[in-house]
Image (cartoon, rainbow, N blue to C red):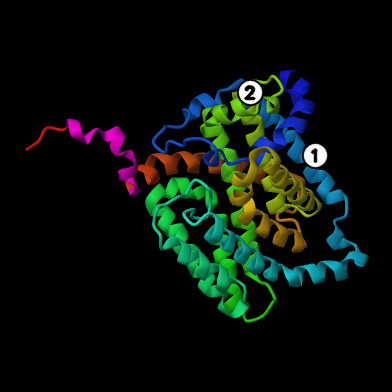
Amino acid sequence: MKIIKITPILLLALPLIVTAHVKWFVEYDTTKKPEPIFSILNSPDVVGLFILSLCVMMLTSLLDRRWRSPVDIQKWQETIMTLEKSAPAVIRYGTSLFFLLLSVLFPYIMLTPELVTDNPALRYVHILVALTAFHRRISFIAGLGILFLYSYAVQLYGTFHMMDYLVFVGVASHLIMQSLRGSSQQGGEIELLRLTLCYSFLWGAIEKFMQPALFDELLRGHTYLTMGLSHKFFILSAGFVEFCLAWHMLTGKLAGYAAQLGLGFLVISAIIPFGHVDFIGHFLFIVPLIAIIFTPRQNHMFRTVYGNTIAFVISLFALFLLAYLSYYILHYQLHPNLFVAQLNFCDLPKG
């Protein structure tokens, strides 16, 4: 009953927190352990929200297959083809502008606001990417530059931390493949971009389940968002909303359009309360989102409603499991330097 009663409130309050990356606004401790997995799965709130999400997914998947998408309407075909042809340019020009802004206004930021370094050479990498992303023939240099920055950030902040930002790998791959293809026609690069962007949103949803307490500081500064709900329940709800939207963006036709436009609106509107930090953080999320809106799915990823819903459930649990394995295995084994404070090396006996 609690979930049913607060559903209208959630629809009004959740959007801003759904798209806010908590790492940009609070002190983020990479060594802090996530919530125990079984305590999350046994939570009545999580079970109730999961059942509600399942019902919503089935209903929206059914409507997505009964209502026609613009790609099925003849009068929209010419417009869609024109937009598809402009999508590669959107990626190039948007990426160029993003790195130009970084080089001028935020020279010590790598890709997102919390990834900082005092390396003065970083600005020159930004300028190189900005100049080479602009033209298709040399955009592969920009793609390689972005991959370099991503790998540099992995070294400093860890693999687990950077799994939230796989969209940058998608953008880099798109720029490289544009040069290799030698034309404005698109192939697998747009699907790779769609996958990495959706994955970044899906991963952001999983993070809300793993460490909901990280959002307490953010919500205390914006108390109006929760509308009287507990912080934990509000964040869990936001996680399910984000996962559902990202799933439809990945798999749907008309539902994909709705999810893309919805997430785009939410990302842009979040700039109002969260300011320039949110603007620069989401800039290179908005650019591929526009490109994906310009290149809608021609067919559903899963043919039936039940197939899509079952895949939704499997993906939710698979990503949940992957997140915990990534934290406890990849994060610790590949980047032990991040855990030096926890290991207390100073207390070890000296030979």
| Bounds of the magenta segment | 334-347
For image coordinates 69% across by 46% down, the residue present is: 267
Callout 2 amino acid:
Asp
Task: For the C terminus, give its image quadrant.
Answer: top left
Residue 307 in view, yes or no = no
Main structural element of the magenta stretch: helix, strand or loop? helix
For image coordinates 84% across by 62% down, the residue present is: 71
What residue is pinned by disc 2? 45
Q: Earlier in the sequence, mark 2 or mark 1?
A: 2
Q: Is residue 333 left or right of residue 208?
A: left
Q: Quadrant of residue 348?
A: top left
For image coordinates 85% across by 56% down, the residue present is: 69
Residue 9 screen position, x and y as percent: 77, 26
What residue is pinned by disc 1? 59
Residue 140 screen position, x and y as percent: 54, 74
Above or below: residue 323 compared with residue 196 = above
